[in-house]
Image: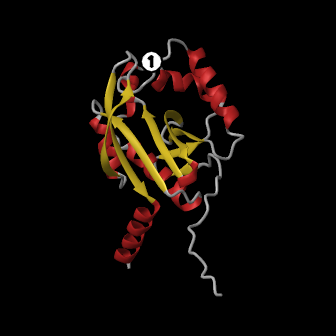
């Protein structure tokens, strides 16, 4: 009897939060030294948390406590949260995370926040593209998705620009700071989608 070899996909290789870089940004691990500027640039700012689930930090100690948790978690190779550093002044101006949601199907969820002082510069799009590339080419994840509330369509536009496709609405899946439920729109991209687009770009460049 002849057994045919099944073409199994590549296995996920968790590499932990590695430094990524573009022309304008450095995505790196947070350190405790980021506390003051993180508090100043986004965790204390109501505009940033307006469409998110957390309240603005009342004092710098709240941000320090959050960073203690994150920095201690970097010991895990499946923990992914990056500090977004603006090269022009080397200040931390936001964050982006990739959370393993379904290990069986190699699926991750993306979340991000950018200081409102830097809105309108395409920063969220730039850092999301870097993380997508890393999670698909280096870590070999199968599917990446992100969600936004119906009060935050701008985030959906960022996802669209990065190749994520709108998949539908999860009714009343979100819950705001006041306890109100709201609909969540789901956008996703698969590794096959990403690799196909990369092959197209390479062919066009020839």
Q: In the image, residue 160 lies at what x, y percent? A: 31, 50
160 above or below 195?
above
Q: Which residue is mark 1?
A: 55
Is 202 or 140 nearer to us in this picture? 140
105 above or below 89?
below
Is 178 or 158 nearer to us in this picture? 178
Quadrant of the frame with the N terminus = bottom right
Which residue is found at the position 28% from the left and 29% from the top?
151
Which residue is found at the position 68% from the left and 47% from the top?
77
Q: In the image, residue 124 lies at what x, y percent? A: 40, 42
Q: In the image, residue 75 lies at what x, y percent? A: 72, 40
**Residue at the far bottom in the pictured view:** 1
In the drawing, does residue 180 fall left or right of residue 8? left
Which residue is found at the position 54% from the left and 12% from the top?
59
Q: In the image, residue 27 lies at what x, y percent? A: 54, 44
Q: How is the image coloured?
A: secondary structure
């Amino acid at each position: 009897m002849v057994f045919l070899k099944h073409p199994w996909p590549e296995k996920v290789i968790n590499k932990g939060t590695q430094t990524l870089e573009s022309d304008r940004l450095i995505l790196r691990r947070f350190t405790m030294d980021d506390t003051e500027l993180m508090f100043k640039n986004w965790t204390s700012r109501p505009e940033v948390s307006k469409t998110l689930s957390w309240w603005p930090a009342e004092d710098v100690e709240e941000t320090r406590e959050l960073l203690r948790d994150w920095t201690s978690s970097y010991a895990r190779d499946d923990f992914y949260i990056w500090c977004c550093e603006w090269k022009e002044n080397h200040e931390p101006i936001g964050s982006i995370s990739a959370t393993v949601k379904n290990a069986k199907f190699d699926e991750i969820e993306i979340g991000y926040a950018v200081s409102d002082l830097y809105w309108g510069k395409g920063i969220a799009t730039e850092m999301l593209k870097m993380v997508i590339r890393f999670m698909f080419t280096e870590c070999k994840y199968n599917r990446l998705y992100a969600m936004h509330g119906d009060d935050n369509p701008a985030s959906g536009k960022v996802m669209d620009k990065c190749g994520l496709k709108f998949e539908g609405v999860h009714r009343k899946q979100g819950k705001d700071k006041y306890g109100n439920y709201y609909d969540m729109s789901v956008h996703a991209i698969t590794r096959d989608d990403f690799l196909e687009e990369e092959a197209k770009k390479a062919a066009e460049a020839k």
